[in-house]
Amino acid sequence: MFSLHEKEDTIVALATPQGVGAIAVIRLSGKDAIKICNSVFKGKNLESQDSHTIHFGTIRDGDRIIDEVLVSLFVAPKSFTKENAVEISTHGSSYIVNQVIKLLVRSGARPAKPGEFTQRAFLNGQFDLAQAEAVADLIHADSETSHQAALNQMRGGFSGEISKLRAELIHFASMIELELDFTEEDVEFASRDDLRILVEKLLRVVEQLISSFDLGNVIKNGVPTVIAGKPNAGKSTLLNALLNEEKAIVSEIAGTTRDFIEDEINIGGVIFRFIDTAGLRETTDVIESIGVSRTQEKMKTASLILYLFDLTDSSMEEINRDVENLETLGVPFIKVANKTDKSNTQFINELKGKFPDTIFISAGQKENLEALKNRVLELVNLDKFRTGNTIVTNIRHYDSLVKTRQSLLDVLEGLDNEITNDFLAMDIRRSLHYLGEITGEITTDDLLDNIFSKFCIGK
């Protein structure tokens, strides 16, 4: 956590990615940000200009011109951090960037720590902790769904749900606390029946938020999808076809893939992490057997399995056996019949009768892959997300919600057992504490350090 002295500093950092580009943006924030920038800027007097204005000029180290720049001014409290802030747009040379930052440091700024801009925004009341965390998620969003989830959280969707829950509970907590001051009069300010109704209502909402985490985790991190089947079923060919590149080695020799080959594919705005695995078969090859064993472990932890089998080299008995084994894993799987271009119609029709949900493809010819993608997408339930429901994507929030649920259950148990007000108040306060942890109304220095240290410098 930053010291009080550090909070008064003016900080500086590169806000755009490192490396050579057309432009680079250097950001300053703090009470002296405009003053410091003005001391090295040749153009208008920045200290007399309005907020949200842009000014052309040069950055100079004495008489030496470092670069021609555009300076954007944000006068407190009308900035991201609610402090005076400046953004200097320079040419994208790493030499220029380093020279400008060194000059600003010599002029009174100090290099920003990871996440310090966003942490200052949080500490200055620009947004709550859940919204601050969403800033990092938004920066790293790599799909439509992860972007939308982060944007919804950053704009206060999730925080709004938590604040409503907390506000309703605070009212009852205050009434019960008040009763503690009138124990001798035996008065009741908070109806126990009304409290039970409220707690049960809160539990339903908390349960919904907790259950949304599986979907939220998928949206944020991608769906781990294992491609499994016998050697030479076409698993590597399918991965290459889905990626539209030669990622995996394809060979007629069985057992070519000895370990995992993994890559990400965006399907319908959702990231799927496809994993090509070693073929499932009995083998005396030590290395291959290790790969087969790892495949079986990977299948158990996957969110989805594509069971791929070769129509020209599989019997109905083998497919039946594999399907039965897959069903025991409890992991959703899709039956994918490969090499339709080489198979006979009779066997295909037999399979359609036995397993009507099978997807028939030719990975080598890239035939019917869209049908496979559509089926894969169907198994990720995005209905809640697309209807605007709040989705939990952060493991810290999930953990606090689980603790909130237990505290609320303790409140109900206390009501059932008619425990005294002081113990009932303790359970309610614990619920409020865990809800407050999510938005930062209840926090610690260690928690803030842990969260913001994961941000990039300049954000």
Image: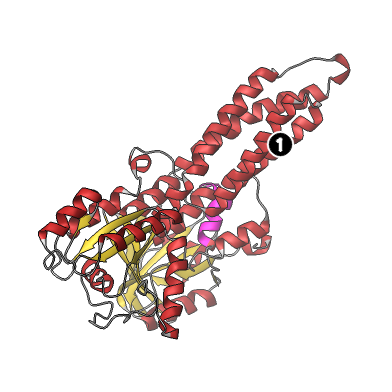
- The percent coordinates of residue 313 (x first, y second) are 22, 70
**Extreme residue toward the right, this view:** 184
For the residue labelled by badge 1, is the local secondary structure a helix, a strand or a loop?
helix
Mark 1: few/some/many CA within 10 Å (<14, 14-19, 20+): some
Q: Amino acid at mark 1?
A: Arg
- The percent coordinates of residue 378 (x first, y second) are 29, 48
Residue 254 in magenta?
no
Q: Residue at x 77, y 26 (%)?
A: 417
Q: Is residue 335 above or below residue 400?
A: below
Q: Is residue 172 left or right of residue 98?
A: right
- The percent coordinates of residue 345 (x first, y second) are 10, 59
Name the image colouring.
secondary structure
What is the number of callouts on the image?
1
Q: Residue at x 54, y 32 (%)?
A: 204
Which residue has dot 1 on it? Answer: 429
Range of magenta residues: 117-128
**Extreme residue toward the front, this view:** 317
Q: 48 or 389, which lies in front?
A: 389
Q: Residue at x 40, y 80 (%)?
A: 283
Q: Is residue 138 visible?
A: no
Q: Is residue 171 above or below residue 427?
A: above
- The percent coordinates of residue 91 (x first, y second) are 31, 75
Q: 256 or 87, which lies in front?
A: 256
Q: Residue at x 16, y 71 (%)?
A: 364
Q: Quadrant of residue 428?
A: top right
Residue 118 in magenta?
yes
Q: Is residue 357 above or below residue 409?
A: below
